[in-house]
Amino acid sequence: MDAVVRGRRVQPLAEILAEEFGDRDYKDDLATLVGDRSNEEIERWIEEGRVTINLRPASVGAQYRDGDRIAIDGREVTARLIEVAPQALLFHKVQGQAIGLEAERDETSTDVESVIDKLPATRGTRWIPINPMHAGDSGLLLFTNDGNLAYALTRRKRWIPTAYMVRVLAPGRDFTPPEIALHVDYDDERVEFSKVTPVTGPQEDARANLWYRVEMQRADHRAAVRALFESRELKVSRMTQIAFGPIDLPREVPRGRQRALTSDQLLALYELAQLKAPSLEPREVRPAHRPTRRPPPDRRRIAKRKVTSKSHKKPTRR
């Protein structure tokens, strides 16, 4: 997905570079190139000729405009400065599939390609999981390229309703399922559930497993779902998230595939996060200003003029 500029801006070059690279800790090689820099240090780089704008050395006080091409030590960093339109997508995660960070891999992880590896490429941004889950869980996994949105939703997980499909191992054919309570004591706190409803699962495992739909009004205690069934001496073999706030997992999205959220769904997430929704209307990106170069001379015309001048040359008198 290409980045889309959402407006025109004019800003001091040193200021915008310091804003972008001053306080952030990037995990790529750019961190070693820029790191934690101040306005004054960026201006010193400009004085030393290390910063170029539109292929020309930048001067102190130069203004950055959307569409300009910026490079530091010959390495272009324009993509980091582009304002991108907010985007979000849902992914149907497979059980045993890690999201992508090495820290998330555990004993349940397999050699399956990570979720991040299967997401579409982005320009100038990265995909941030909104509702991260363990590799052993599956189902609805949401991503956004807006860090503010992901952070706000993380802070409000206590008030975001969620729903899960839970598969429980049945001890035997004649097993009578116990009544499941609507609360459990987990992590020194009583966690309440809205509904715990038995449902019909696939026919092939109807005798060996029991299925439940579990709904709760908070998204910050995923592990409490397992604790609820373990309190009744039932072992959970699979837990699939099917809803997060206003977003449901579509039946037509197969496992291992993703789908972009609609504008209405994205706006609903901003409302859920209690954030002001930004403009989602893309605007045309002006091409970068390129310095004009004098075209090379047409050597054929030069040669023709020389021949013509020789033919019209008056003969010399002796």
Image (cartoon, rainbow, N blue to C red):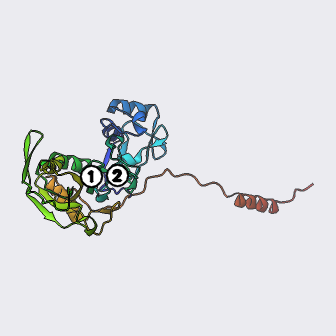
Residue occupying the point 46% across, 31% down:
48
Q: Secondary structure at mark 2?
A: loop
- Residue 173 figure quarter: bottom left
Q: Please state the horizontal and vertical placement of residue 21, each as a whole percent of the image.
A: 34, 38
**Circle 1 residue:** 137
* Residue 108 vs residue 40, the one in the foreground: 108
Instruction: Let me know if residue 291 appears in the view.
Output: yes
Label of residue 245 in the image: none
Q: Is residue 298 above or below residue 107?
A: below
Query: Does residue 246 appear in the picture of this structure?
Result: no
As drawn, which residue projects farthest toward the right?
318
Other-residue count near label 1 (Cα within 10 Å), few / some / many at <14 / 14–19 / ≥20: many
Report x, y in % for residue 44.
40, 30
User: Which part of the image, by quadrant, shows the N terminus?
Assistant: bottom left
The residue where tag 2 is placed is: 97
Q: Does 304 sit above or below residue 232? A: below
Amino acid, disc 2: Gln
Quadrant the C terminus occupies: bottom right
